[in-house]
Image: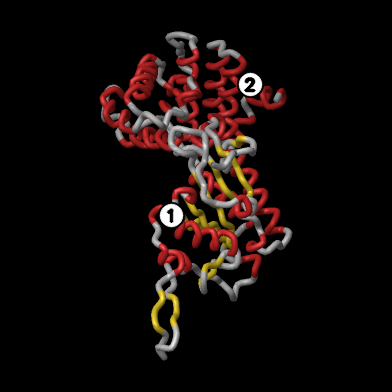
Amino acid sequence: MATINVPEISTGKLVERVTAFYTGMLKANIPCRDVRPVMLFGPTGVGKSSGVMQIADRLSKEMGREVEVVDIRLTSCTITDLIGIPVPDKDKKGTIWLTPEIYRRETEEAVEPGKRKIFIYFFDELDKASPAIQAAALQLILDRKAWVHSFPEDTFVIAAANPARGTAKYETRMTPELMNRFKHFNVQPDFESFREWGINEGLHKYVLGYLAFDHGKLYAGNESQDIAFPTPRSWKSVSDLLTIYEGQYDKVRELHYDIAAEIGTAAALEFEGFCDIYRMLPPVEDIFSGKPAALPARTPDVMNAVIASITTYVREHIETISYLELSNAAKFVKAQKFPPDFRTVFFLNLKKLQEGAEAYSKELMKVPEYSDWVKKV
């Protein structure tokens, strides 16, 4: 058993730190083969794979180069998927190794180093691979080559492992000498990281509102007993389900079996009960148009639902939304006497939507309530 003796880190902070690490190495002209591989420990569905994709996206923006992620699920690999198949050469005096698909990437040898494509090879489920697969994978991870096959010049390597089911422990056959070749990150669920990611991804307002109301439901943490349980991954699936069937059902409860199939029966019933709140809220269009509107109650569940609805509306209309509409939303929150912590969440959501939306950002900064909040924080 391996003990995780590194601090816990959220997916958002992981993306930030690993991107900075890779960017620094590239700018310092350190060869990628000399950059330590990264190991991600973390429970099922916490967002390790999603984090790798976010790292690639940010690295591409930072370096102005294309970044491709090659996702290798080691539990689905055979040894020939990693080292190829030996066949006789044309003289039948020796062997050559057929090139596996994972190496068939454009190496761009003729392109100057600063403009070559960057690759991130992601070895998932390393801890659950068979000894033979793990041995071949470790050679690739540490040396960027296996037998006669090599990864492209500008290749970073990330591996991932899950804890033993129902425990916080990690089973691994790797020796301490090998483990010492990695940078280790202990990735754990974090609502703030999920919220920021969810706003950018356009997660359904019901999911954003419910998890803002009860952060503890982001991850169940009881994998040992339940077949279906809440994780960031399964909440994304619930969001997709609600988006697909938007307007086709009078109540979310009519999707109970589909939702329960994603997050389990108990969690689904609680979530569906929360979603009933949205039926009592004033139309979000009235809030933005400045029409008289009031809340059925000033309770945490209601206020979180309203904030999620407002955030979703802004995201959907971000190209055309005006200062007047944003001002009306801010005035509504003020008039309904949202407590300071709820106003902070409201403004943080609006702030997060500024990324890549210049016109919206200018309109938002005209709103007195928002600009005053920015000055304070």
The one nearer the camera, 296 or 17, is 17
> How many marks are shown on the rendered structure?
2
- The percent coordinates of residue 84 (x first, y second) are 43, 70
The one nearer the camera, 283 or 134, is 134
The kind of residue on which mark 2 rests is Glu
Q: Is residue 329 above or below residue 84?
A: above
Residue marked by disc 1? 130
Q: Can residue 197 be seen here?
A: yes
- The percent coordinates of residue 122 (x first, y second) are 51, 54
Rendering quarter of residue 242: top left
The kind of residue on which mark 1 rests is Ser
Rendering quarter of residue 297: top left
The first of marks 1 and 2 along the sequence is: 1
**Residue, x 70% and y 25% (percent of image)?**
377
Looking at the image, the residue that sits furthest to the bottom is 91
**Residue, x 63% and y 38% (percent of image)?**
5
- The percent coordinates of residue 73 (x first, y second) are 43, 53
Crowd tier of the residue under label 2, counting other residues whose Cα lies within 10 Å: few below 14, some 14–19, many 20 or above? some
Q: Quadrant of the N terminus?
A: top right
What element does badge 1 sit on?
A: loop
- The percent coordinates of residue 125 (x first, y second) are 46, 49
The one nearer the camera, 108 or 257, is 257
Q: How is the image coloured?
A: secondary structure
**Residue, x 63% and y 43% (percent of image)?**
16
Residue 369 shows which numbered tag?
A: 2
